[in-house]
Image (cartoon, rainbow, N blue to C red):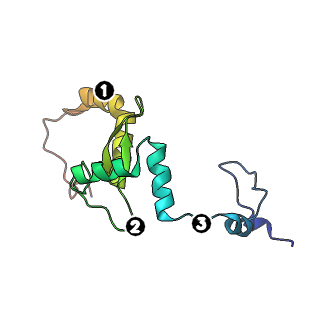
Amino acid sequence: MVRSLSVFHLKGAGDKRRRICGPCRDAARIPRTAEARFREKTKQYGITPEQYRALLAAQAGVCAICGTAPTPKRRLHVDHCHTSGRVRALLCQPCNTQLGSYEKMRDLAAAYLAKYGAGNPLLAYDAAPVSSDAAA
């Protein structure tokens, strides 16, 4: 069957296209159950599903940072130390993502706050603050 070039999606940021069209790729995918995905994820972090459930119970079933309960379709993520690989706790998706970003930027953010935490030294602060109405 001849298909339009548009169904051969681009690979990454380049201009190379995939060798299999989107519809054929979708048809070839083997559907996995939520339980199978859960087992794969726990195995990825070196814990068993039972250990995951024990962590969840120890955290009263909520995110270890913000206390948000998981939804029926979204389990809590297994947070782990990227240096040691050790599991720390279970987090909701927003907390897990923000913590990862924080860890990557921690030293840069500390240096920034040390330099500009009290305000930029190149700016004069003795004048009254500029309101958004005065700028217009």
Q: Secondary structure at mark 2?
A: loop
Q: Earlier in the sequence, mark 2 or mark 3?
A: 3
Q: Indicate which disc residue 111 carries.
A: 1
> In this rendering, would 136 be left or right of 86?
left
Secondary-structure class at tag 1: helix
- Residue at 80% across, 70% down: 4
Residue pointed to by mark 3: 31
Tag 1: amino acid: Ala
CA gap, disc 2 and disc 1: 40 Å
Image quadrant in which you'd find residue 20: bottom right
Amino acid type assigned to the residue bearing label 3 in the image: Pro
Residue holding disc 2: 73
Numbered tag placed on residue 18 in the rendering = none
Please say whether residue 68 is visible from this viewpoint: yes
In x, y percent, where is residue 40? Answer: 50, 51
Residue at the far right in the pictured view: 1
Locate residue 57, reporting x and y percent: 24, 53
